[in-house]
Amino acid sequence: MNIGTVAQRSGVPAKTIRYYESVGLIPSAGRTAAGYRVYGERDVATLRFIQSARSLGFSVKEVGALLTLWNDRGRASADVRALALQHIADIDAKITELRSMRGTLQHLVDHCAGDGRPDCPILDGIADPARLGIAAACCRPEGEAG
């Protein structure tokens, strides 16, 4: 199969397939005499696996580790579970960070009159968050006491 066919069957754009190859996530494709990449069914399955893992938010490095485990029939499921648990912890940390960012932005919006005047607490807060006490006052997850 050529790269266009593999891209269509796997749901991964050709440019992304070339990127995954360049970073070693997938092996270099075989080449025809004319220099075109040639792929097989296993490549399609691997790209679908990668696409699925990426849709769950795993980094390229994490996907590499998952691929290694996926291809190792002697793997311990505990190793896979450990990777997934670490990823959940990373997601939880990002959620906390996003809630904090949301709280900060909500604080700024709440203090903005939104009228025709030029003064703007939102821009002032972005320019100098410490001056407005944003870091201490509103960068906690929602519902957390200050």
Image (cartoon, rainbow, N blue to C red):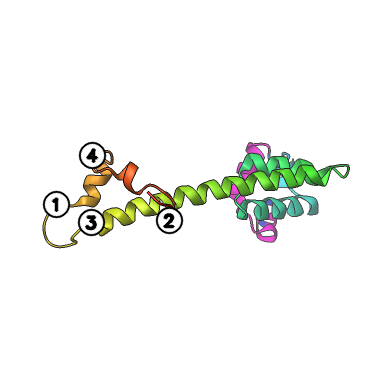
Mark 2 sits on what residue?
142
Mark 1 sits on what residue?
119
Helix, strand or loop at disc 2? Answer: loop
Above or below, comparing residue 119 to residue 29 in the picture: below
Q: Position of residue 69 (x, y in %)?
A: 78, 43
Which numbered tag is attached to residue 111? 3
Q: Amino acid at mark 4?
A: Arg
Q: Residue drawn 64% across and 43% down?
A: 20
- Between tags 3 and 2, which lies in front? 2
- Between tags 1 and 3, which lies in front? 3
Q: Which residues are magenta?
A: 5-24
The secondary structure that dominates the magenta segment is helix
Q: Is residue 80 magenta?
A: no
Mark 4 sits on what residue?
131
In this view, which residue lies farthest toward the right?
74
Q: What separation in Å lies between label 2 and label 4 (alpha carbons)?
A: 22 Å
- Disc 3: CA contacts within 10 A as few (<14), some (14-19) or many (>=20): few
Q: Residue drawn 57% across and 49% down?
A: 91
Above or below, comparing residue 128 to residue 113 in the picture: above
Which numbered tag is attached to residue 35? none
